[in-house]
């Protein structure tokens, strides 16, 4: 306001406005040119952990930048955590749509906004994710039709799960002839981000033409930790071998390499008592 009063005083001393002139010609220095710089850390983000976006807005002058607004809609692959701003900036918005305002930024001065978000577990490994922020001021150059904006990218790190320390108990199921045996499947799932789904699949070494295929089902998957298999066979049948495949799938629908445990069912000796081994 002081600058405009001074301009009016000078104009009055000169005897009025130039022919066909306007006050805008003398008030051009009141405009402010803003620049926006965006940075991100880390650039490779493990799912389930946080990423920090740092936005720096600078008033290149020559005037004071008034009512400065930064808009940043965070990527849908992220969840907003927090916002902070220097210079009395006010953080607002809802969900991932963030709006930060400054009453004024002086010429040749900078203010910083820090946005923190969590990368969702559903994000696939290697996916590139962009985030674009924009800034405007009520005293920007009237010839500028667009907001100043800046985009930064991160790369998601979300390796598939790994199955470790897997085993089946008992490994030699042997109840009475042609009965079902309960088997517990033990394993550990290593993954950076849940939830994890584990699936068990059972197969056996015998051909589809085996006589036992005409009877009741020879295995049942009870849940992700337990199966039931048909065990001891009457001599002179050959040994029966079951293979239990363990696979884990993460929230991004990425599957682990399958891990296999085997159960060996030897034929029963004629006249021998049924038992577990």
Image (cartoon, rainbow, N blue to C red):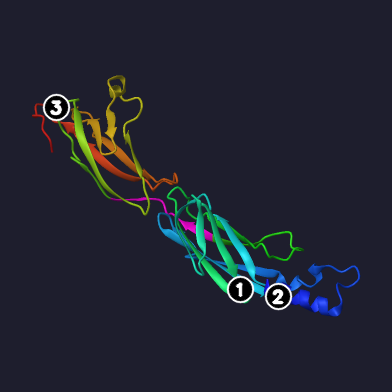
Indicate whether 209 appears above or below 109.
above
Q: Alpha-carbon distance for marks 1 and 3? A: 88 Å
Residue 3 numbered tag: 2
* Viewer-proximal residue among 79 and 271: 79
Give the quadrant of residue 178.
top left
- Boundaries of the magenta span: 154-164
Give the quadrant of residue 277.
top left
Q: What SS does tag 2 mark?
A: helix
Please report contact status of discs 1 and 3: CB closer than 8 Å, yes or no. Answer: no
Magenta stretch holds residue 53: no
* Residue 8 x/y as whole percent: 77, 74
Please report contact status of discs 2 and 3: CB closer than 8 Å, yes or no. Answer: no
Q: Alpha-carbon distance for marks 2 and 3? A: 102 Å
Residue 53 numbered tag: none
Q: Alpha-carbon distance for marks 2 and 1? A: 15 Å
Please report contact status of discs 2 and 1: CB closer than 8 Å, yes or no. Answer: no
Indicate whether 180 appears above or below 57.
above
Q: Which residue is mark 1?
A: 106
* Residue 27 x/y as whole percent: 76, 71
* Residue 195 x/y as whole percent: 36, 45
Q: What SS does tag 3 mark?
A: loop
Q: Which residue is mark 3?
A: 176
């Amino acid at each position: 306001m002081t600058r405009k009063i001074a301009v009016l005083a000078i104009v009055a001393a000169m005897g009025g406005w130039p022919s066909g002139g306007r006050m805008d010609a003398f008030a051009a220095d009141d405009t402010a040119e803003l620049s926006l710089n965006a940075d991100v850390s880390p650039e490779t983000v493990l799912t389930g952990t946080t990423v920090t976006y740092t936005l720096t807005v600078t008033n290149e002058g020559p005037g004071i930048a008034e009512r400065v607004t930064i808009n940043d809609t965070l990527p849908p692959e992220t969840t907003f955590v927090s916002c902070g701003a220097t210079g009395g900036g006010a953080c607002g918005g809802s969900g991932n749509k963030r709006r930060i305002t400054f009453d004024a930024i002086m010429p040749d001065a900078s203010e910083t906004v820090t946005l923190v978000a969590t990368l969702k577990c559903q994000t696939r490994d290697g996916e590139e994710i962009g985030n674009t922020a924009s800034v405007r001021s009520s005293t920007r150059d009237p010839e500028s039709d667009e907001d100043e904006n800046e985009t930064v990218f991160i790369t998601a790190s979300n390796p598939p799960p790994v199955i470790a320390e897997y085993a089946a108990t008992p490994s030699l199921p042997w109840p009475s002839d042609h009965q079902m045996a309960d088997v517990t499947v033990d394993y550990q799932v290593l993954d950076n981000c849940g939830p994890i789904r584990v699936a068990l699949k059972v197969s056996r070494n015998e051909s589809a033409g085996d006589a036992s295929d005409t009877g009741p089902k020879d295995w049942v998957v009870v849940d992700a930790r337990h199966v039931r298999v048909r065990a001891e066979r009457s001599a002179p049948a050959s040994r029966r071998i079951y293979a239990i495949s363990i696979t884990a799938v993460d929230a991004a629908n990425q599957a682990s390499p399958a891990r296999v445990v085997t159960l060996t069912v030897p034929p029963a000796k004629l006249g021998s008592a049924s038992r577990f081994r």
